[in-house]
Image (cartoon, rainbow, N blue to C red):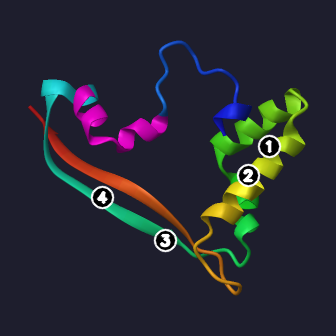
Amino acid sequence: MSAFAAPPPAGAQSPPLWGNEEHLRGLLGDAVEIGTLHRDVLEITAFTRAREYGEYFRSHYGPTIAVQANARRTDREAEFVAALDRFCDEWNRGGDDRARFEKEYLVAVGRRR
């Protein structure tokens, strides 16, 4: 989506970096002792068709709504929707009767020192 997003503010970092253990430790520094790091995968099976996943995000998820609005302002909305459709088609791990997407996440549990 970054190709269609407005430029981030100076100094902003990409939110997916929070899923990187090294980056997380760097952000927290010595102020937090991390006791647990656990990776898992969330399976998303709420959609019959793969592209319903993208449609849902375009109408309900703030960051996707903002990127689509920027694409609209720059006359690239159709290109954005097509790119999101391709993404959904490519990452669908389901079959003909049900779409399935996998989202990896990191759970970090720590305590302030």
Tell me which residue sits at (30%, 58%) in the image: 39
Q: How far is the residue under mark 1 from the one under mark 3? A: 25 Å
Amino acid type assigned to the residue bearing label 2 in the image: Leu
| Contact (Cβ within 8 Å) of mark 3 with mark 2 | no
Q: Residues within 10 Å of mark 3 (few under 14, many from 20)?
A: few
| Contact (Cβ within 8 Å) of mark 1 with mark 2 | yes
The disc placed on residue 80 is 1
Reading the image, the residue beneath label 2 is 84
Q: Residues within 10 Å of mark 2 (few under 14, many from 20)?
A: many
Q: Residues within 10 Å of mark 4 (few under 14, many from 20)?
A: few
Tell me which residue sits at (61%, 78%) in the image: 94
Q: How far is the residue under mark 1 from the one under mark 2? A: 6 Å
Q: What kind of secondary structure does the magenta stretch mostly adopt?
A: helix
Is residue 55 shown in magenta?
no
**Mark earlier in primary sequence (1, 3):** 3
**Numbered disc 2: secondary structure:** helix
Q: How far is the residue under mark 3 from the one under mark 2? A: 19 Å
Residue lying farthest to the left in this orientation: 113
**Numbered disc 4: secondary structure:** strand
x then y, percent, for residue 23: 30, 32
Which residues, given as a range, are shown in magenta? 15-26
Reading the image, the residue beneath label 3 is 43
